[in-house]
Image (tube, grey):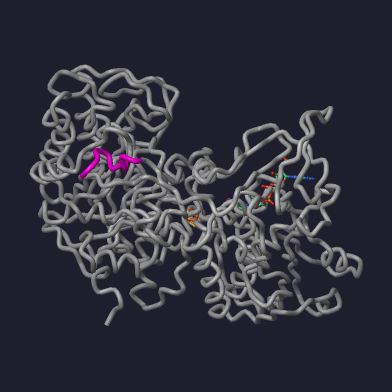
């Protein structure tokens, strides 16, 4: 008897049956643009072998003007169709099902040819769109229908028509972006004509035995978004027009409320989908921040939807469903919703991967094979770099011993997990613990190893991490001064007025830790909704709370400082930096750049500005916390070198600048693949 009876139940779609209720949601990985079709096929086939019920590809442009950026992938020629057939064949050989997403970006397109219902520039693209005339609208519909026909020809089991997230179709639905006065604008009947026509004509073109998923924005999270009555009306019309499944979209891309980041509570928006249940008779999919089989099962058992969509969790672990079926959920690599290797890559023009699983999208390049000869391997340091090396090397058949002077594994992850909004790191450390055991790594904790202890191994890997950088501020030895380690690891008492020196990733984390007390809003959905101003779309169009964000009062008065004159937090993650900055702003944290640190005394920290150190002033504080960056801890590596023992140095011990778990895990895994 499975623990997940709802999640693993088949879903009968009439002409075909899905083997379970798990959808791998659409993700733009950048793989299709590589034109390495073997690589694309292997990415999807690995997930098909992993047992997922249905997959949706990244968004494919129906035409040049609708591409998210110039050169975005689409099915434009017979050659494109033949290439996509390589993918669908490989998926079908693996007994999987795959639908192609058709994504018309409208005014979100990052290109001068973009088109929209009205010529209103979006806040996230510099290009004002051209307003379409009647003929232009007919062309867009025809192109979307043609894309669906081509998808069918290419062997896809269906298409997903992207009608949410503020893209083209969504732009017709709300008056915020649709100011037309013809039959495509004005009344809601007119504004929803476009999606209905698209679905109706697509169904006519592709026949009955082809899946059409319509992704419908159920809570726009922008001012003057759709009302929930409109959402229900649209869903009913979309069903009538011939859709097979309705998928949930949450929030436009320009919304200023986080919808998928790690600080968003798990399954934070399934209550929105639940409001639609019973209004349509076709299956409904819910999504956003569902990342374990337990959460998926709970959501379905509560009647929030007929199926769940998870996207990033399939980057973290291609075998998510298979492991759930086998009752091995604790071995599923957890998606911690950090965006660091997936969305941040997409928005930097890089191919997506996964912080937890560097093989994601690199399946054909980073191959983990059994070792030709078994070696003894010592790994020193049980942080993310050392853990990934040890686990991968042991999985390949090596005899691995992992040392750490701490009595627990995880290294800096154990500090990250203390930060409100970063609770997913608990699951990551737990997963590492399971995998260390499963791989058969010998763990030696609470042991300070010396160079002498490491002489008998075939391979030695040094992953000893980092030490805090000393900012050398006069008076920093006072007992009102702490390091981030004192605060996050040793939980030393911190006063009510705090100055944080250094506004990097750790400075922001420490500030977040210090302004909160009690339960983290990430663990309490109602509190989180209040904090960010998420309301009920049945009461306010778009679902923004009329009273706006209502964060709790900050637990402390925090000032965050840096020497660089740029905006603090500018270098944080591309897709999450704004959330960290907004969260601290809501808590009244003052962020100041361009200061010199003069001295610390009992009154606080004296700073000045400019090269000539003008305007000295004291920022009053009970506690000063130093977060001035980190330096490599190479002491053991240097001692080994002196003894002439060869070693591999990885992670923070190798390069401390811009160290993060993504680089550490990637470097550790790649090294272990070659040992
Ligand atoms: P960091 O991001 O490099 O920031 C170091 C901070 O210290 C900067 O604000 C820097 O600004 C300041 N600083 C540097 N030298 C200094 C000196 N001599 N005296 C005083 N201040 C000095 O490093 P981190 O905060 O230690 O974080 C370490 C790594 O972990 C980073 O790569 C970070 O991205 C990563 N991390 C990421 C997250 C995340 O949310 N993604 C969270 C935690 C950590 P000025 O030089 O302008 O003063
Ligand atoms: Fe999830 Fe982070 Fe991996 Fe993206 S990079 S899939 S958010 S764990």
| The magenta stretch spans residue 641 | no
Looking at the image, residue 37 sits to the left or right of residue 406; the answer is left
Query: 580 or 436, which lies in front?
Result: 580
Between residues 208 and 640, which one lies in front from this camera angle? 640
Instruction: Report the span colored magenta.
Output: 539-547
189 relative position to 616: left or right: left
Task: Check residue 546 for magenta coloring.
Answer: yes
Q: Quadrant of residue 443?
A: bottom right
Residue at x-position 25% and y-position 19%: 132
The residue sitting at the right extreme is 642
Residue farthest to the left? 240
The quarter of the picture where the C terminus appears is bottom right
What quarter of the picture does the N terminus occupy?
bottom left
**Is residue 404 shown above or below 573?**
below
Q: Where's residue 509, x and y in %?
A: 60, 53
**Residue 669, quarter of picture:** bottom right
Q: Residue at x 76, y 47 (%)?
A: 603
Residue 70 is at least partly visible in this image: no
403 above or below 69? below
User: x, y percentage for residue 635?
Assistant: 84, 64
Magenta segment, prevailing SS (helix, strand or loop): loop
Left/right of residue 270 with respect to residue 462 in the rendered view: left
Instruction: Please provide percent x and percent y for residue 657.
Output: 72, 49
Residue 472 appears in the rendering: yes
| Closer-to-camera residue (588/573) | 588
Residue 186 place in picture, x, y as percent? 16, 24
């Amino acid at each position: 008897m499975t623990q997940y009876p709802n999640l693993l139940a088949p879903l009968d779609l009439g002409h075909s049956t899905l083997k379970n209720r798990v959808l791998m949601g659409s993700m733009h990985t950048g793989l299709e643009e590589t034109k390495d079709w073997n690589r694309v096929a292997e990415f999807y086939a690995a997930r098909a072998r992993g047992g997922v019920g249905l997959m949706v590809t990244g968004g494919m442009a129906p035409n040049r003007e609708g591409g998210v950026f110039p050169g975005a992938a689409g099915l434009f020629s017979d050659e494109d169709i033949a290439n996509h057939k390589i993918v669908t064949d490989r998926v079908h050989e693996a007994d999987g099902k795959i639908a192609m997403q058709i994504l018309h970006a409208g005014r979100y397109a990052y290109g001068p040819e973009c088109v929209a219902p009205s010529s209103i520039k979006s806040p996230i693209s510099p290009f004002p769109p051209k307003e379409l005339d009647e003929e232009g609208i007919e062309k867009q519909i025809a192109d979307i229908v043609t894309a669906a026909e081509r998808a069918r020809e290419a062997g896809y089991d269906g298409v997903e028509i992207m009608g949410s997230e503020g893209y083209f179709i969504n732009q017709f639905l709300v008056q915020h972006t649709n100011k037309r006065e013809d039959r495509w604008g004005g009344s809601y009947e007119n504004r929803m004509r476009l999606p209905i026509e698209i679905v109706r004509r697509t169904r006519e073109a592709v026949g009955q035995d082809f899946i059409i998923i319509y992704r419908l924005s159920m809570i726009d999270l922008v001012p003057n978004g759709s009302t929930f009555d409109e959402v229900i009306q649209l869903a009913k019309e979309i069903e009538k027009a011939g859709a097979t499944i309705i998928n949930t979209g949450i929030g436009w891309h320009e919304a200023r409320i986080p919808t998928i980041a790690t600080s968003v509570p798990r399954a934070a928006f399934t209550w929105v989908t639940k409001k639609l249940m019973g209004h349509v008779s076709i299956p409904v999919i819910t999504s956003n921040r569902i990342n374990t089989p337990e959460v998926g099962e709970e959501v379905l058992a509560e009647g929030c939807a007929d199926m769940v969509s998870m996207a990033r969790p399939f980057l973290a672990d291609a075998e998510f469903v298979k492991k759930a079926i086998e009752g091995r959920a604790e071995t599923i690599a957890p998606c911690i919703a950090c965006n660091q290797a997936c969305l941040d890559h997409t928005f930097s023009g890089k191919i997506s991967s996964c912080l937890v699983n560097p093989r994601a999208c690199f399946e054909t390049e980073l191959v983990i094979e059994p070792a030709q000869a078994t070696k003894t391997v010592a790994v020193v340091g049980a942080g993310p770099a050392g853990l990934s090396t040890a686990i991968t090397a042991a999985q390949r058949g090596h005899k691995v011993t992992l040392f750490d002077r701490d009595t627990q594994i995880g290294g800096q992850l154990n500090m990250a997990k203390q930060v409100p909004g970063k609770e997913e790191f608990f699951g990551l450390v737990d997963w590492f613990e399971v995998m260390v055991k499963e791989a058969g790594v010998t763990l030696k904790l609470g042991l300070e190893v010396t160079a002498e202890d490491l002489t008998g191994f075939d391979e030695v890997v040094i992953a000893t991490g980092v030490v805090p950088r000393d900012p050398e501020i006069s008076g920093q030895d006072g007992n009102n001064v702490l390091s981030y380690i004192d605060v996050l690891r040793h939980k030393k008492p911190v006063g009510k007025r705090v100055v944080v020196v250094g506004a990097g990733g750790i400075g922001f984390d420490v500030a977040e830790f210090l302004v909160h007390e009690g339960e983290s809003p990430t663990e309490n959905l109602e509190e989180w909704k209040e904090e960010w101003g998420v309301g009920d779309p049945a009461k306010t169009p778009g679902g923004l709370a009329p009273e706006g964000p209502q964060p709790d009062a900050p637990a402390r008065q925090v000032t965050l400082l840096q020497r660089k004159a740029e905006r603090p937090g500018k270098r944080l993650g591309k897709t999450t930096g704004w959330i960290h900055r907004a969260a601290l702003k809501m808590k009244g944290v003052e962020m100041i750049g361009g200061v010199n640190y003069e001295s610390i005394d009992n009154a606080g920290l004296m700073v000045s500005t400019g090269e000539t150190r003008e305007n000295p002033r004291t920022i009053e504080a009970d506690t000063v916390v130093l977060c001035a960056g980190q330096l490599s801890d190479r002491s053991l590596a240097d001692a080994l070198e002196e003894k002439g023992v060869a070693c591999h140095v990885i992670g923070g011990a190798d390069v401390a600048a811009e160290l993060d778990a993504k680089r550490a895990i990637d470097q550790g895994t790649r090294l272990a693949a070659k040992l």
